[in-house]
Amino acid sequence: PFFSLPLRLALSSRRPRIYDPTCDSRAVHRSYSANNYHRTPSPQPSPYLLAKLRDYESLHRRCGPLSESIDPTLNPREFRTDDCKFVVYSPSQGLGNRILGLSSTFLYALLTNRVLLVDFGPDMEDLFCEPFPNSTWYLPETFPFLFQLQTHRFRASYSYGNLLKKKEEEQNKGGKIDQDGDSSSSPALLQIFLQDKYNEYDKLFFKDENQGFVERVPWLVLIHDGYFIPCLFQMQSFRSELEKLFPDQETVFHHLVKYLFSPSNQAWGHITGFYEAYLAKAEQRIGFQIRVFEPKQTPFTAVMKQITSCTQKHRLILPQSDEVTLRNGTSKSILVASLSRKYYEEIDWMYGRRRRQATGIAVYQASHEGKQHSGDNSHNMKAWMDIYLLSTSDVLVTSSMSTFGYVAAGIAGVKPWIVMIPDPYHPRGADESACERAINLEPCFHFPPWFAYPDPPGTGGPVGRCEDVSWGLKLV
Ligand code: GDP
């Protein structure tokens, strides 16, 4: 209350950051055996992936912000680093999108021997523990291109797409195009713009023949908010390394999210407090994640109809029919994560309050924020808490197209039932079922470039269709 906003922001961004060995959640979050929070044991990572992560950690220590490699006295135009290259992740959209985007960027960093740095604002403060030992992933204030980053929400003049477009225009005028020339012709900084509205030039980043040029640029800034890993699997440049890292390619995201995103001590305090009070003792935990993108145009009853027909058809809550009571003493807890309180109230009415004695079911909601906020740290903290609490479910019911649900399922290691939420912009056919069980833990990439689709369709190799987005791609 004593500080004006800009001063508070300045203070928070100056806090020293370093890997915290006491991160309370890390041992549980990264554990592969079943534990108090996640009852499903996790698939083990490959020894090759573990070795790659250890190599990455030493690269990060050697080249990262606490090393000497980033010299702030250099003129940005001249800025080169000898043997260290970087990729900066700049967030946009909601927390689910950010976690998918950051996971994809980290895998790209692993594949290309780059150091991952994050350009988090105050709204992302204190959500996660630092993942890389004895270092930090925060972009240092001495980053030589801070000014250029200010415009990062948009396609920058130094974006790769713009460069390719300009080169094509020059070539059409009969000029010389120098895409594969020596390293002196490559820029020090390149923005890779991969937002959902990226254009045909931006998409060429995913072409094998362009990786040689990108590889020579010391600083990349990636602007995107989706899970583009299926496209990396479609590129010959990375395919064999990816197959060694992930012999089981249906758990790529699961391994990345477990490695990168341990809740901070503050977040862990909120999560475990709620968990111990309401969820820990239940014999079965069921998580509902209800995300309605257009609440004003989407009738509440239509959403509830989809949810109840899914749960009844697949007997997700009660074993036989809604009227059958549970075995004596059985207890179930249902967590409803949603921006709205109405879904919680309705589910509580159906299964909790009205028949609690008979069913042993209790229904909870940790927060109901009303609508999505941007730039709000406590809102993001609640979102992270909801995602994590959902991940402790034994049975998960998520919403179509929602990255929030993909992340919860990825951490849980539980294949969710994805409810097809009515969407005024993408109406579904009458014959479509209310929900579909996800075939694996992989998120859907919603906006792949046309050339990443398997040709002919159905012969996808590592990629195939998503359950919930007909134009999306996922690892299968
Ligand atoms: P998506 O839009 O469903 O793909 O998920 P995102 O996480 O990218 O963006 C939605 C944002 O809205 C979240 O990050 C939260 O800020 C907010 N939000 C949506 N659903 C919930 C919810 O169930 N609980 C909480 N606490 N926040 C939510």
Image (spheres, rainbow, N blue to C red):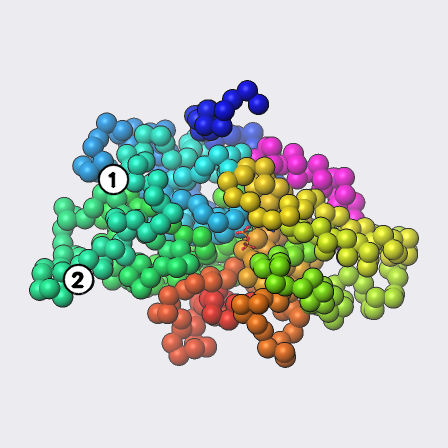
Q: Position of residue 473 (x, y in %)?
A: 46, 66
Residue 220 visible:
yes
Work out whether 414 lies above or below 280. below
The residue closer to the viewer here, 306 or 104, is: 306
Which residue is identified by label 2?
169
Q: Would the CB of label 1 be found within 8 Å of ligand 1?
A: no
Tag 2: amino acid: Glu
Could you say which disc has been placed on residue 48 in the image?
none
- Label the magenta part by its dominant secondary structure: helix
Q: Position of residue 21 (x, y in %)?
A: 52, 30
Work out whether 94 lies above or below 63. below
Residue ID at (83%, 66%): 322
Q: Is residue 237 left or right of residue 32?
A: left
Residue ID at (53%, 34%): 126
Residue ID at (59%, 77%): 429
Tag 1: amino acid: Asp
Residue ID at (63%, 79%): 431
Q: Mark 1 and mark 2: span between their CA atoms?
A: 33 Å
Query: Is 309 in the magenta?
Result: no
Which image quadrant is residue 304 in? bottom right
Mark 1 is surrounded, within 10 Å at the Cα level, by few (under 14), some (14 to 19) or many (20 or more) other residues, namely: few
Residue segment shown in magenta: 262-284
Work out whether 119 lies above or below 41. above
Q: Earlier in the sequence, mark 1 or mark 2?
A: 1
Q: Is residue 193 left or right of residue 410?
A: left
Which residue is identified by label 1?
83
The residue closer to the viewer here, 293 or 135, is: 293
Q: Position of residue 366 (x, y in %)?
A: 70, 44
- Give the SS element for disc 1: loop
